[in-house]
Image (cartoon, rainbow, N blue to C red):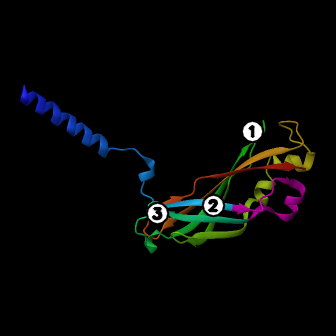
Amino acid sequence: MRSRYRALLAIALVGLIVTACSSSRTDKADTGGVLLSISDFDGLPVQVSVTLATGVGLISVEQLTVQNLPLDPNGLTSDLMNVEIQSYEVIYTRGDTGTRIPTPLVRGLFGVAPIGGTFDVENLPMMSLEQLLEEPLSDLAALGLDPETGGNTILLNFSLRFFGRTLGGDNVSTAPAQFTIEFIP
């Protein structure tokens, strides 16, 4: 009876060890021990005239801050945790009943977000002339309305992410920062 009890206890203990070692927690992913975060942005328009923006050639945010935080604030840090910013992307979705969207904006960008520090960007393009000249925005500028919805405004949701690599070689990215802009003719 005792040997059966010991055998069951041993099996339970092995099961517990295997379960503890096979955790699927995403916060333990190999990110070089850092968390890259869009912590602040200022000067983002809430309404844009497509006609005026096409003349300028882009829509931008005046100032944006990307923060590089250590995952363990009480742990040791090193310069290998500095993040070289490599690129960013802006993906668009509709905030109204329409389905047509501009192609994503993907651009290279160079800078360094030191561990525990920030990377500041000024006048970062959120939409270039290429996106402004695509449907549905081109229709809004030319016709004064969106033929798909019949509306004279278009709501576009913007989803912004930055991508980089720690000096230690780990790929990192920010969580998407989201905002909405209303487009008028």
What is the CA distance from the residue labelled 3 to the residue labelled 1? 43 Å
Q: Which residue is mark 3?
A: 73
| Amino acid type, mark 2 | Ser
Q: Earlier in the sequence, mark 1 or mark 2?
A: 2
State how far apart marks 3 and 2 are (Cα). Answer: 17 Å
> In the rendered structure, which segment of residues is drawn in magenta?
41-62
Up-down relation of residue 78 to residue 95 (above or below): below
Q: Which mark is residue 99?
A: 1
* SS for dot 3: loop
Q: Earlier in the sequence, mark 3 or mark 2?
A: 2
Is 184 rendered above or below residue 42?
A: above
Name the amino acid, label 3. Answer: Pro
Instruction: Please state, as top left, top right, bottom left or bottom right, where the N terminus lies in the image.
Output: top left
Is-magenta flag for residue 42?
Answer: yes
Magenta stretch contains residue 151: no
Q: Nearer the viewer, mark 3 or mark 2?
A: 3
Q: Residue at x 86, y 38 (%)?
A: 147
Q: CA gap, disc 1 to disc 2?
A: 30 Å
Q: Residue 28: x percent and y percent?
A: 41, 52
